[in-house]
Amino acid sequence: MKKLIVFALVSILLGVSNGYAKEDCLSISKKPVKVEAWVSKKYEKDYRNIRHEFQEMGNTKVGLFSIRQKIRLG
């Protein structure tokens, strides 16, 4: 019985193989990140400053859009 258990454990341990991840992926610090933000119209004059702050993080493409709400009467 002990020989059977030892044989089973050895066969299980020999049958298991280690898997490794592919190393082709770029790290997040090197990968460009796209940032899109919908900003209120009252901050429209600060777009350049906001875009500059996002770009200071590095590897970012920034798209800012203003929210123009239409008010319907009636």
Image (tube, helix red, strand yellow):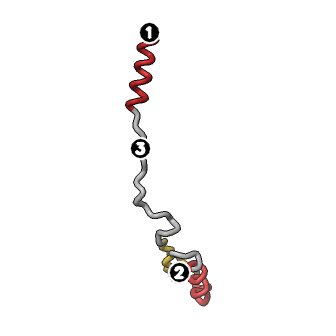
- Are the residues tagged 2 and 1 within 8 Å (C-beta)? no
Which disc, if any, is residue 73?
none
Circle 3 SS class: loop
Q: Earlier in the sequence, mark 2 or mark 1?
A: 1
For the view shown, which residue lies furthest in the top direction? 1
Q: Quadrant of the N terminus?
A: top left
* Residue on which the image places disc 2: 67
Res. 1 in view: yes
- Which three-letter amino acid code belongs to the residue tagged 1? Met
- Which three-letter amino acid code belongs to the residue tagged 3? Gly
Image position, residue 56 (x, y; %): 59, 79
Which residue does the image show at 48% across and 78% down from the upper left? Answer: 61
Q: Earlier in the sequence, mark 3 or mark 1?
A: 1
Which of the two residues, 26 or 66, is positioned nearer the viewer here? 26
Image position, residue 65 (x, y; %): 50, 81
Which residue does the image show at 46% across and 11% down from the upper left? Answer: 2
* Residue on which the image places disc 1: 1
Circle 2 SS class: strand
Image position, residue 35 (x, y; %): 51, 74
* Residue on which the image places disc 3: 19
